[in-house]
Image (tube, rainbow, N blue to C red):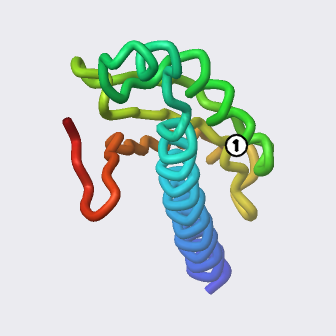
Amino acid sequence: MAICAAYVVLVIALVIDAGGRLRVAERTDAYAQEAARVGGQELDRAVLLQGKGFKVQKEYVKQAADAYLGLYHLQADDVEFSEDRKVVIVTVRADYRPVLLGALGERKVTGKGSATLVHGVEEAETD
């Protein structure tokens, strides 16, 4: 009976900690998505004023993403762009500390989010 009870407690601990890790992964994805959106609003003004279209600059995007993520004690692990520099991709890593398993389940959780740079008054335009 004692052995069965130990296994039941272990299974419950695994379920609770796995659920917690999934919640952290979901939140990390959401933070990365919002950081990409915030960063995508940082237009390269020099390119815009030269009439070369709507583009973003990596330094501005990283600073804006880190400022947003700083509210949640996170930072952007990586900022990438599509080839045409109209899609911003932000990667965020967060620590997950299990409640019941302690150091056994301690892991980094990665979230990735992207935002497409669009503009337009009446409808979204990408060119």
**For this rendering, which residue is in front, 58 or 110?**
58
Please indicate, yes or no, whether residue 92 appears anywhere in the rendered image. yes
**For this rendering, which residue is in front, 4 or 10?**
10
Mark 1 lies on a secondary structure that is helix
Q: Residue at x 47, y 50 (%)?
A: 33
Instruction: State the residue position of label 1.
Output: 69
Q: Residue at x 49, y 21 (%)?
A: 44
Tag 1: amino acid: Leu
Q: Residue at x 52, y 45 (%)?
A: 32
Furthest residue in direction bottom, as rendered: 1
Res 21 quadrant in image: bottom right
Q: Give percent across and percent down for residue 35.
A: 56, 44
Res 107 quadrant in image: top right
Q: Give percent across and percent down for residue 76.
A: 61, 30
Residue 127 is left or right of residue 59, and the answer is: left
Q: Is residue 105 above or below residue 67?
A: below
Quarter of the picture containing the N terminus is bottom right
